[in-house]
């Protein structure tokens, strides 16, 4: 069945460095790619999303890139801060379903 | 605040029992999703409803069932509970088509 892979599963970076999380999906019908951040004990919250007609989108320190041919998309966080520490989930969606990746636990070390 | 509400916030019950979790979506959202998140685990998709109809099913056990009512709120029923059912259960809602999901605060279920 369709699935979304996400790497790495854990990531530690020094404050101020960049962090990159990569996802691949299998469903060719996917055309919507959101990223969610989940802080400990809290609900997942949307941080950025991209649709298949766009290759890149940026919002301040966060950017997402999409390679539809290769079925890859990535989250880039620049100038990381301790408050970026959380679990990040990618997802791939089409009209009738959204599939989440397994998550990446990001730790930003002060 | 996402606009999605879930009750109760916490639930402690014994094995073999049955519980009902409730979710009210954001105003105007027709889609409701249910997820299970065990400790240090990802989001396991259980089921999706759209305007009262079941739209997609994930890894939902036969002991679990859900429904969406005419006022669009949804309930997840968990029966014959086992210790392994202890988890955080999230509800999310979204607008039409592929669009952002907005998550509720979750219900933490503890089965003893």
Image: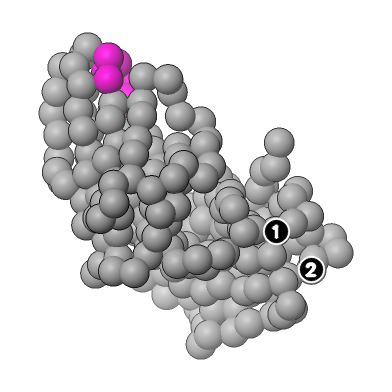
Chain that bears disc 2: A
Give the structural element (helix, strand or loop) at label 2: strand
Give B74 or A68, whichever is nearer the viewer: B74
Q: Position of residue B45 (x, y in %)?
A: 48, 41
Q: Residue at x 33, y 49 (%)?
A: B91
Observer-side mark, 2 or 1, equals 1
Q: How many marks are shown on the rendered structure?
A: 2
Give the x, y percent position of residue B74.
Answer: 29, 46
Q: Is residue B15 above or below residue A29?
A: above
Residue denoted by label 2? A67
Instruction: Give the quarter of the image for residue A22.
Output: bottom right
- The residue labelled by disc 1 is A30
State whether residue B28 is above or below residue B111.
Answer: below
Is A78 inside the magenta-drawn segment? Answer: no
Left/right placement of residue B35 relative to residue A24 reads left
First-in-chain label (2 vs 1): 1
- For the C terminus of chain A, which image quadrant? bottom left
Q: Which residues are magenta?
A: B79-85
Residue at disc 1, secondary structure = loop
Locate residue B93: give its quadrant.
Answer: bottom left
């Amino acid at each position: 069945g369709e699935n979304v892979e996400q790497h790495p599963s854990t990531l530690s970076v020094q404050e101020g460095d960049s962090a990159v999380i990569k996802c691949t999906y299998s469903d060719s019908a996917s055309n919507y790619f959101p990223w969610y951040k989940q802080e400990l004990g809290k609900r997942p919250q949307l941080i950025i999303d991209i649709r298949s007609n766009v290759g890149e989108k940026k919002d301040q320190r966060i950017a997402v890139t999409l390679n539809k041919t290769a079925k890859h998309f990535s989250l880039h966080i620049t100038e990381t801060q301790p408050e970026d520490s959380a679990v990040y989930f990618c997802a791939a969606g089409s009209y009738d379903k959204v599939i989440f990746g397994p998550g990446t636990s990001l730790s930003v070390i002060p | 605040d996402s606009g999605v509400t879930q009750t109760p916030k916490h639930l402690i019950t014994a094995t073999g029992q049955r519980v009902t979790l409730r979710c009210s979506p954001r105003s105007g959202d027709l889609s409701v999703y249910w997820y299970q998140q065990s400790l240090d685990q990802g989001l396991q998709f259980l089921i999706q409803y759209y305007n009262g109809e079941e739209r997609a099913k994930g890894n939902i056990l036969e002991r679990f069932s859900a429904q969406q009512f005419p006022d669009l709120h949804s309930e997840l029923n968990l029966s014959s509970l086992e210790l392994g059912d202890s988890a955080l259960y999230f509800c999310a809602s979204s607008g039409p088509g592929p669009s952002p999901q907005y998550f509720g605060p979750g219900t933490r279920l503890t089965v003893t």
